Amino acid sequence: MVSELGVGNTIIRLYKEDITAFHGDAIVNAANSALWMGSGVAGAIKRLGGESIESEAMEKAPVSSGEAFVTGAGNLKVEYIIHAAVMGEDLVTSEALIRTATQNCLY
């Protein structure tokens, strides 16, 4: 574990490891507003967790950049996945957009 933070009645623990091997309540996926899960971390989550994760996410697409929402976790060892739209379809992000998406993950 890298860090731990209490927010209200919730404890947030930050880890530096393979996100697809994590056992816990939830993981956060840095998503694009179209909710494609084709490559990188999102692609690994889809490959190991199953197509149902992307299918469930795509039912909510498109979302506004900065938005966050929850899906099931498929075959992963967590209860759910929080998808944080930190970039638009152009895959461009900013510090402000990441901050907004992170805040929305916490609520």
Image: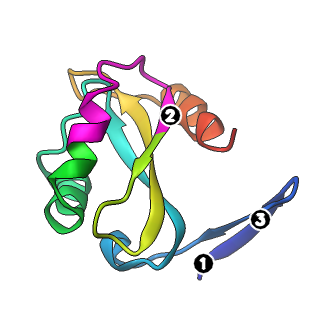
Q: Determine the residue positioned at 55% across, 27% down.
A: 96
Give percent across and percent down for residue 3: 67, 73
Q: What residue type is labelled 3?
A: Leu
Give percent across and percent down for residue 7: 82, 54
Q: Which residue lies furthest to the right in this view?
A: 8
Q: What stretch is highlighted in magenta?
A: 55-69
Tag 3: Cα neighbours inside 10 Å, few (<14), some, or many (≥20)? few
Q: In which quarter of the image is residue 1?
A: bottom right
Query: Which SS type dominates the magenta stretch?
Result: loop
Q: Which mark is residue 2?
A: 1
In this rendering, position of residue 89 left or right of residue 26: left
Secondary structure found at label 2 = strand
In the rendered view, tell whether residue 75 sits above or below residue 43: below
Secondary structure found at label 3 = strand
Nearest the viewer among 75 and 101 is 75
Q: Which amino acid does label 1 sit on?
A: Val
In the rendered view, tell whether residue 77 sits above or below residue 55: below
Q: Determine the residue positioned at 46% across, 57% down.
A: 80
Q: Determine the residue positioned at 33% across, 39% down.
A: 31
Which mark is in front, 1 or 3?
A: 3
Q: Which mark is residue 5?
A: 3
* Residue labelled with disc 2: 68
Which mark is in front, 2 or 3?
A: 2
Which mark is in front, 2 or 1?
A: 2
In reply to whether residue 63 is colored magenta, the answer given is: yes
Q: Which of marks 2 and 1 is nearer the N terminus?
A: 1
Secondary structure found at label 1 = loop
Q: Determine the residue positioned at 15% across, 52% down.
A: 51
Image quarter in which the C terminus is found: top right
Tag 2: Cα neighbours inside 10 Å, few (<14), some, or many (≥20)? many
Measure how far apart labels 2 and 1 are at the Cα level. 23 Å
